[in-house]
Image (cartoon, coloured by chain):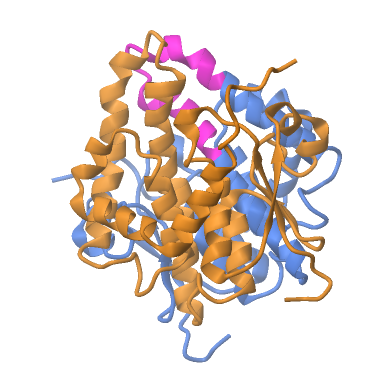
Chain colours: A orange, B blue
Amino acid sequence: MNAEVAIPIITTYRWVPPFARGLVREVRARWAFEEVGMAYRVDLIDLPYAKSEAHRRFQPFGQIPTYSDGAVEIFESGAIVLHIARQAPGLLPDDAAGQARAIQWVIAALNSIEPFVMDLAVVDVFEADAAWSPARRPTVEQKLRSRLADLSAALGERPYLDDAFSAGDLMMASVLRGVPHSAILADYPNLAAYRARCEARPAFRKALADHLATFDDAGEAPAVA
Amino acid sequence: MNAEVAIPIITTYRWVPPFARGLVREVRARWAFEEVGMAYRVDLIDLPYAKSEAHRRFQPFGQIPTYSDGAVEIFESGAIVLHIARQAPGLLPDDAAGQARAIQWVIAALNSIEPFVMDLAVVDVFEADAAWSPARRPTVEQKLRSRLADLSAALGERPYLDDAFSAGDLMMASVLRGVPHSAILADYPNLAAYRARCEARPAFRKALADHLATFDDAGEAPAVA
């Protein structure tokens, strides 16, 4: 590692509601650090600060995670994972073709799968009380299932999306962790096994445990001015 | 360029309905080729073929574009643009920090902006006849406007998202081209000017013209068995 580069710092929320614990996007960055064996630090921030002008200078949408190592300052979990992957072996193949495929799967997770996962979460959680949600839900679930069926066919019987575990699997498994209702993923047994296989990796288990430990003393939601 | 690598071939649809012309995602790849001055070929495919097993071997979701140069075979417009950007100067800064920021903006376009653009297109086009669309539309438009306001603040008065035009601007401008109803983007004058600035680049104009020329003799929708 370049001597001028400090230990990277990522930001995440000090508190999130229990249903969101384990699913916060900074887990993706933690997982990447653990896979490549890089030390990192975590800066816990409060939601009001995330929405402040100071934080938006680094994350225009007022979200987390952000990454800073003194030389590189970026946001977007996908970009952070790819940047970590470029710094040490473990998440990208050595050959250009394999690297291109790993990046392809990172982007497929974020653009071809995650919007459909989020859409069902919107129906079931964020717009659960909206008048239109019950009528709309079957369409939204069907669109997600269509993408999952395609992904299931692409994965087939292989353990990972390509020859070896890569940043693409890290991101795809992270996105699949957000599929609401385990019954949906269970209808695609190879995807359910794939997610479990990725979640069983020591690097993920360490990342998730460290993430969850931040809430040990979290208690109730903080008062917001 | 490596002598073993053939001229890249991208796939796109032979025919799309008039409302989609100019917005097909292969335009992003064409634009990238033009920015870096790389020759490429286009393989026009029919929609039934896109949904075939043969095409899904390269694009699991039965979509376009795909990219193949004999050594690298990938899908996802974002991954294709980044792969083109790595092969010749013009779309990525020379320094690692600048490259990380360009990749960040590519992913921000695809994961933090495009899902909200697509959601409004779903309401206004793909689910325009659905019973829930009128009631849901204000919420969807407001979510998109919130993202556009954040992006507008991040861009400020600069001509591009970073110091110089990059793959990140190519992707962000491409995504902004999909914002339905020009009146929405007009409410964020710096974003409207940014999109127009990107669209005025000779590389984009060439890419768009070549894309539109494929429909010169397209006529009516092809008969589908």
Look at the magenta stretch and give its main secondary structure.
helix
Residue A8 falls in which quadrant of the image? bottom right
Q: Is residue A69 left or right of residue B18?
A: right
Residue drawn at point x = 49 percent, y = 82 percent: A95
Q: Position of residue B64 (x, y in %)?
A: 39, 55
Q: Is residue B125 above or below residue B161?
A: above
Q: Residue furthest right?
A: B157
Q: Position of residue A202 (x, y in %)?
A: 43, 63
Q: Residue furthest bottom?
A: B3
Q: Is residue B156 visible?
A: yes
Q: Is residue A174 left or right of residue B181?
A: left
Q: In this view of the protein, which residue sits in the foreground, B57 or B95? A: B95
Residue A143 falls in which quadrant of the image? top left
Q: Quadrant of the C terminus of chain A?
A: top right
Q: Is residue A164 above or below residue A223?
A: below
Q: Quadrant of the N terminus of chain A?
A: bottom right
Q: In this view of the protein, which residue sits in the foreground, A180 or A130? A: A180
Residue drawn at point x = 60 percent, y = 34 percent: A217
Q: Is residue B33 visible?
A: no
Q: Position of residue B81 (x, y in %)?
A: 56, 62
Q: In this view of the protein, which residue sits in the foreground, B161 or B190? A: B161
Residue drawn at point x = 49 percent, y = 26 percent: B120
Q: Please check the rendered image and state whether residue B130 is part of the magenta-colored stretch, yes or no.
A: yes
Q: Please check the rendered image and state whether residue B34 is part of the magenta-colored stretch, yes or no.
A: no
Residue A170 falls in which quadrant of the image? bottom left
What segment is highlighted magenta in the picture?
Answer: B114-141
Q: In this view of the protein, which residue sits in the foreground, A126 or B203? A: A126
Q: Residue furthest front?
A: A217
Q: How many numbered marks have been drawn onto this rendered protein structure? A: 0
Q: Position of residue A222 (x, y in %)?
A: 66, 22
